[in-house]
Structure formats: C-alpha cells, structure tokens
Amino acid sequence: MHCIKVQKLVDKILRRRSPSISLIKVNDADVLYTLARITKTLLGYKEHNVIFVLTNRPVDAVLDMLDSHGLEVLNAIRDKRLIFIDCLTKPTGGVLTKHALYVSSPGDLSELELTIERAIKMLVSKGKRIWLILDGLATLLLFNGAPCLLQFLVFTVSRLRALNSYGVILFYNSELERPLEGVLRQYVDEIFEL
C-alpha cells in the first residue's frame, strides 16, 4: 500500500505498462477534496476520458462542490470527456439534469452496468483511454448485499480489463466496506492510500 498525493498517484498508475485497476483508500474527512483533486488531475490529461459513478451523493451536489474548488467541469461534460452516472437523484425524486446519466436505483446493478456500457460507448474515441471511477461501495452494499456487489465488481473489473481501460474504486473504509477489502485485493492491481 502506498500513501501518496493524487497527482503522484495518477502518474504512478499511468507509468504501468497497461491500464490497471486500483483501490484507493480515502480518509473520510478528505472525501470531497479527494473527488475534486482526482477530477482536476484526470481532466488535465487530454488523452483520457472519465466516467464517474456517484453512489454516495447526487450529481448536483458534486457539481457544486467541484465549482467551489474552482473546477469548471461543464465544458468537459459538453466535450464528452467526462460523464457522471448518478445512482441517487432519480430514486429520491430529485431534479434530473442533462449533466449526468441516471440509474433508477442503487439496488439495480444490472441497470448500472448497462449505464456504464452506455457511457463507455459515448466516450470511446480513437487514441483515448477511459477511466471509470466508482465513488465508494457502502450505498451499493446496503442495497445489494455483499455477494451481488462482488459479482458486479468482478464483472466490471473484467470488462475494464477487456477494454484496456483504467478503473478506480474509492474505498472509504467505512464499517460496511471493511469486510470487502480482503476480497477486493484479489481483483485490483494496486492499493493506494491518500
């Protein structure tokens, strides 16, 4: 496990011979800051496109937070370099915007996988790599249970490897997530701590 900063972390991942799947352990107090730093860093690489799966907060809150950190991501969304997949707004009756793809429930992993595939097709362009960032596991774990969530993660990781794409699982080390860490270690290439 490596304890490093976001820019160095992304650089380290990019130096690998091929795209990899990483588990990034994030301190609870630094979650929003880490989301902002990861987004800023990845958007700085023009040859990479980003899919951000939001399971813990709605896209409007994330956009507001990114804006408060001085990041204007709407251009990246418009230019098809960044897609948010929101798992919370639709089931809670929130206002849907054009800035994200929406899943009807965090409990529908099949729909989430199809939405990820749709986002990949929207972002695929010659010479660009895709990063899929999964913003935590606790909500998905609550709605689906460990066995279903692990099946979803194994499939998603395998799909990313087949597409020669990068994957990042943000792991917040919550009481719910901790029992999954040992199993997740088997499916990721590297574990980092921020």
Image (cartoon, rainbow, N blue to C red):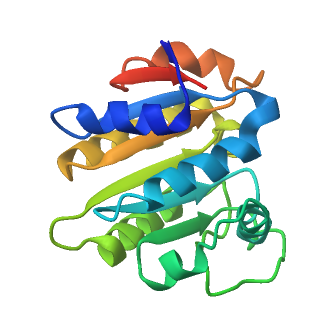
Residue 151 visible within the image: no
Residue 153 x %, y %? 44, 39
Q: Is residue 28 above or below residue 10?
A: above
Residue 159 visible within the image: yes
For residue 16, side relative to residue 49 (left or right): left
For residue 124, side relative to residue 26 (left or right): left
Query: In which quadrant will I find the C terminus?
Result: top right
The residue under the point 66% across, 70% down is: 104
The residue under the point 33% across, 65% down is: 46
Find residue 69 and report its image quarter. Answer: bottom right
For residue 29, side relative to residue 188 (left or right): right
Residue 50 x %, y %? 43, 61
Q: Is residue 74 above or below residue 63?
A: below
Looking at this view, is 73 or 97 the one in front?
73
Q: Is residue 64 above or below residue 189?
A: below
Residue 151 x %, y %? 44, 37
Figure label count: 0
Residue 158 x %, y %? 28, 41
The residue under the point 76% across, 35% down is: 30
Looking at this view, is 48 or 141 the one in front?
48
The residue under the point 26% across, 71% down is: 124
